[in-house]
Amino acid sequence: MAGPLAGVRVIDMTSVAMGPYATQILADMGAEVVKVEAPEGDVFRTSAPAAHAGMGPAYLNLNRNKYSVTLDAKAPADRESLLALIDGADVFVSNVRPAALARLGLDAASLCARNPRLIYCSAVGFGQDGPYAARPAFDDIIQAMSGLADLQGRNSGAPAYVNTILADKVAGLTLAYAIPMALYERERSGQGQAIEVPMFETLVSFTLVEHMSGHSFIPPLGPMGYSRVLSPQRRPYRTRDGYLALLPYTDAQWRRFFALAERPDLAADARYVDAAARARHFDELYQDLADIVALRGTREWLALLAEADIPHSPVNTPEALFDDPHLKATGFFQQVEHPTEGPLMAAGIPVRFSRTPGEIARPAPRQDADRDMLPVGR
């Protein structure tokens, strides 16, 4: 592969979603990623539905462009093989709990002493200098602890999880950008270092960007929570025959929308004349928006809003994305041929490089498919 990370070797001792999502991004961009699985395999291999055991869709969607070897790190011979792989690597990534890694001699101090240029990455639930350090962590737990579930459920009366593994993927993205930063610094210093990416702190940081709100100040100038996002009226709006996503945002866009709606009274309303006024009246504004949208059909609105250059969208189902004209034109979805699973549909690589693009060069491997990568005799 010839992506921007070509020549970087990653030993990937992660499973489920956070770590594999990060290492797949690296693999898509040309890194040689060797996935080291325990004998029982990555638990996401058991996701359903599957054509064959051990090749579930969640696993397939998180492990393309990688190689797979199976090693039992508790067995001395296999541990030596793993150490030999790490000795020749640029990056080691693991979501095994740090205490367990230390017992196996796979802690950062031990591995960086063997390979001083190693970037050692710990994908953990919680920062290791806090009281939660040893706790297990999964996406639902982190959504709840971070305040996200509370925010998500404020308009329904009960906390709710976001319907995607958001904590895993946000932490995975964070891990994916942290590793190239460390590689860049190593080019200047010649030295590796340890990186810790905790899910809890990462999702708190992610969630509070806008929701810190009045508590950004000392003393607080108001409550936490971004009022526009938390408005119970912020939702896809019902048209005469369906639903529509609509968000006039700038003063000019709101003026154009009120003109389309033939509501000069609202254009002149003191509550809506500028961004500062609207920020104090989001509930009323969005209720007026909902009342207006209900008067016309979806197709009529889509045409009018496109002509007026006002941000809008149909409300797609996930299935509808396969027929989205933009995704078709950009070739986003790609069909790949798997040697055992047959033809597969893959979501493409969203980031584009003009000279060194990433690519989907190989589908996710069956477990231990690349055992020949191990040192001779293993």
Image (cartoon, rainbow, N blue to C red):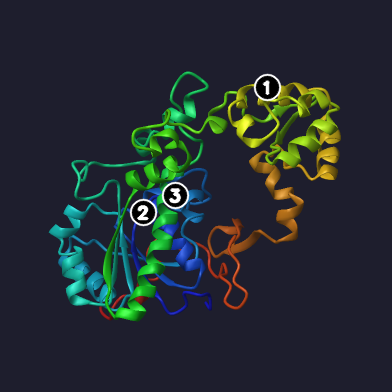
Which label is found at residue 339?
Answer: none
Q: What residue type is labelled 3?
A: Val
| Front-most of residues 128 and 86 | 128
- Few, some or many C-alpha atoms within 10 Å of disc 3 (few <14, some 14-19, many ≥20)? some
What residue does disc 1 label?
A: 287
Quick check: marks 3 and 2 in contact, CB under 8 Å? Answer: no
| Image quarter in which the C terminus is found | bottom left
Picture coordinates of residue 375 (x, y %)?
28, 79
Q: In this view, does 346 lie above or below 299?
A: below
Mark in front: 2 vs 1: 1
Mark in front: 1 vs 3: 1
Alpha carbon distance from label 1 to label 3: 32 Å
Residue under the point 72% across and 26% down:
289
Total numbered circles: 3
| Front-most of residues 177 and 164 | 177
Quadrant for residue 282, please give it: top right
Q: Which of marks 1 and 3 is nearer the N terminus?
A: 3
- Few, some or many C-alpha atoms within 10 Å of disc 2 (few <14, some 14-19, many ≥20)? many
Alpha carbon distance from label 3 to label 2: 16 Å
What residue does disc 3 label?
A: 170
User: Left of 213 or right of it: where is 218?
Assistant: left
Q: Is mark 2 on a helix, strand or loop?
A: loop
